Amino acid sequence: MRNVNALDVRNKLGAILDDLERTGEPVIVNKGRRPRAVLISVEDFQKRFLDRQTEERRREIVDRVTSARAAGVTGTDSVAVLRNLRGPLG
């Protein structure tokens, strides 16, 4: 990981972003000799955060479908079940 100070980020942001894109290596931003932030590539962000959120949402939906099955949803058409799972649209 590369360390840069906040002043360098302010003055050389374009070059730092180019290096980040080229290497994919996270950049630690220090202020007053203390780490204050980390710059990561868009790909790392998607892998670490967006994909995780998507997986969590998928698990929630699977759990809701499983619980609906366990509750014995009989006599209800599939469209009504899907509407119930999706919740209010407004």
Image (cartoon, rainbow, N blue to C red):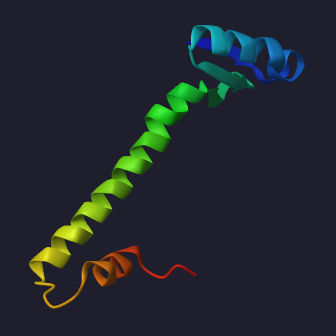
Q: So how many labels did they put on this image? A: 0
Image quarter of the C terminus? bottom right
Q: Is residue 66 above or below residue 30?
A: below
Q: Quadrant of residue 61?
A: bottom left
Q: Quadrant of residue 51?
A: top left
Tell me residue 37's x, y (percent).
65, 32
Tell me the residue at 69%/21% (across/down). Answer: 33
Tell me residue 25's x, y (percent).
56, 13
- Residue at the bottom extreme, as displayed: 75
In the displayed structure image, the side of residue 26 where residue 13 appears, left or right: right
- Residue at the right extreme, as displayed: 11
Tell me the residue at 63%/21% (across/down). Answer: 28
Q: Nearer the viewer, residue 39 or 28?
A: 39
Tell me residue 17's x, y (percent).
73, 18
Tell me the residue at 21%/88% (across/down). Answer: 76
Q: Is residue 29 above or below residue 58?
A: above
Q: Is residue 31 above or below residue 68?
A: above
In the displayed structure image, the side of residue 65 where residue 61 appears, left or right: right
Tell me residue 30's x, y (percent).
70, 23
Q: Is residue 82 above or below residue 33?
A: below
Q: Nearer the viewer, residue 4 or 46?
A: 46
